[in-house]
Image (cartoon, helix red, strand yellow):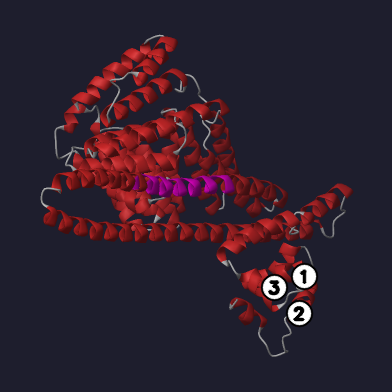
Amino acid sequence: MNEVNSLGNLMEQLIEGDSLQTIQFLDSLERSPKAKGNYFKTYFCMVKSDVLYEKFAGYDKYKDRSSVALIPIKEQLMELYADALDAAFYTEDDLLIGWVNFYSARRILSFGETGWAVMYTKNGVDLFEKINYAVEPPVYTDLAALLHQVKEYDEAIIYAKKGIAAWKTRDFEESYEDPYKYKVNALTTIGSSYYNKNEYDSATFYLQYALQLATDNKDTVLAGKVSGNIGKIIYAQSQYDSAWALFKTDYHFSILDSAYNQAANASQWMAKANLARGNMEAAQADAMEALRLLSLWPSAQYRRDTYYTLNQIHRAMGNYDSAFYFTDRYILLNDSLEKQVATSSLAISKARLNSEESRFKIQKINKEKEKQLFIRNSLIAAIFAVSMIVLLIVSRGRLNDKLELEKAEKAKMLMEQEIQTAREQINNFTSHIVEKTSLIEKLEEQLSGNNVTSKQQMLVAELSRQTILTEGDWLKFKSLFDKIYPSFFQKLKKTAPDITVAEQRMAALTRMQLTSKQMAAMLGISVDSVHKTRQRLRQRLQFSSDTNLEEYISGI
């Protein structure tokens, strides 16, 4: 801890100094003959990264964290963190490794690298626990919130509970102002995680606990926000009047706290509750209020949810053109958010793999050095040395076998994650096209029998074109399909080498177990054309009339 405090003082002096002089000092220090050893390299990389961040990449320099100008700075900092971690691994000092992980996570998170931040924070906390180093409660609580953000709900619950328990281990409460707020946040994370796991009884227990704690401390704003989370559970249990009242409380106190993003989310839930109660105009007003608040404090997740709610409202009101408009915006934003979650999950896996590979690599190097020293000192006792060498060879073989097995298991896990992601994307892909088709049919019904204008006819025609599976759509669909059923098309072509693209599409949709109507919607053809294409596929595969096409294709 003394080293950390000393580094903090040094960084403050460098950050306050002239930028050019600071960079020159760091460069000269790095070139110094005395700049040796893994401890020095670890501390130097961390100091340099912090100075570069504060001088060139802080929030006061770039409020827009997605700025292209930040990319080279972020890459340089990521490289410094990786070098610091490698050097720390060489020391085999778990406390030092833990601090490097922990401080790296805070900076990485500021660049939006949530997946890496989760893994670095978790590594740091786990190492602190390993050596019985006291972890402060807010550290657990912040880690739990990050885990909840990337949908790791079980681990979020574990670390949030550790955060609550940590307040009892030492005199942490004297070091923090309003410690109850951290406890309420931890309890809310636990309750929200159980809610997302559809375990409503457990969710209610922890959220009621959080509400009581906020109420006891007369914190009406925090109590209002917790009430909104309780409202989600009550809504799921079809108690719409009570849920609406809780969402209204959340909205009111979030506005008072100027937390417009939270107020927007509460307003969106009010719209859901009003729609369920049959108050469609009030629901529409609540949803539009949510969009207004999101223009003041943007949140992609809350905007996506609001688009979905507006889609449901307009469908209920029979405004299918508006429903289609908000469906498109929901799909576009939802795909982007789901990609971010998938990217974060892959980043966590990659960070874990890189960390373990670095540790094993450095441990192996250290062991090789120890082995060389041992052999040199063991020449005096040759018989003893030979026996030890044999033992080391056997041990190293076992270690290599273990590492290879672990790598194979990790590769398998990554492959399963990729297949699962592809499966979800292809399901979303097909369901979105089918939903568009449903909206078009209802719009056509609404227009039939009326005096249809040429503009309305053009709208229907344009919407119909969007349901056709284009070449680009097919390539995207085929890419996802190949991940789930890797050898499907190869086997199909082996059975029927001259099979056409249209017949391949029909075989793939048959493997997805879609109905003829759904196939027609996706391909932009009639149901009768679907039957004809299926018949040509049967002929191409040289099936008899009593052969079941669906069973055969499901077995490919």
Ranked by sequence position, the earlier of labels 1 and 2 is: 1
Q: Secondary structure at mark 1?
A: loop
Ranked by sequence position, the earlier of labels 1 and 3 is: 3
| Residue 386, x across and y down, in percent | 17, 57
Q: Which residue is mark 2?
A: 540
Q: Which residue is mark 3?
A: 493
On whether residue 350 falls in the magenta region, the answer is yes
Query: Mark 3 and mark 2 in contact (Cβ < 8 Å)?
Result: no
Q: Say if 294 sits above or below 129 in the image.
A: above
Q: Secondary structure at mark 3?
A: helix
Q: Quadrant of the N terminus?
A: top left
In this picture, which residue range is highlighted in magenta? 335-356
The main secondary structure of the magenta stretch is helix
Q: Which residue is mark 1?
A: 500
The residue type indicated by label 2 comes to Arg
Alpha carbons under labels 2 and 3: distance apart: 11 Å
Query: Mark 2 and mark 1 in contact (Cβ < 8 Å)?
Result: yes
**165 relative position to 266: left or right:** left
Q: Answer whether residue 512 is visible to the viewer in this image.
A: no
Instruction: Name which residue lies at 69% across and 73% down.
Output: 493
Q: Secondary structure at mark 2?
A: helix
At label 3, counting other C-alpha atoms closer than 10 Å, the crowd grade (few under 14, some 14-19, many 20 or more) is some
**310 relative position to 272: left or right:** right
Q: Answer whether residue 359 is visible to the viewer in this image.
A: yes
Q: Say if 446 sits above or below 531 in the image.
A: above
Instruction: Name which residue lies at 71% across and 72% down.
Output: 516
The residue type indicated by label 1 comes to Thr
| Residue 478, x across and y down, in percent | 65, 61
**243 relative position to 4: left or right:** right
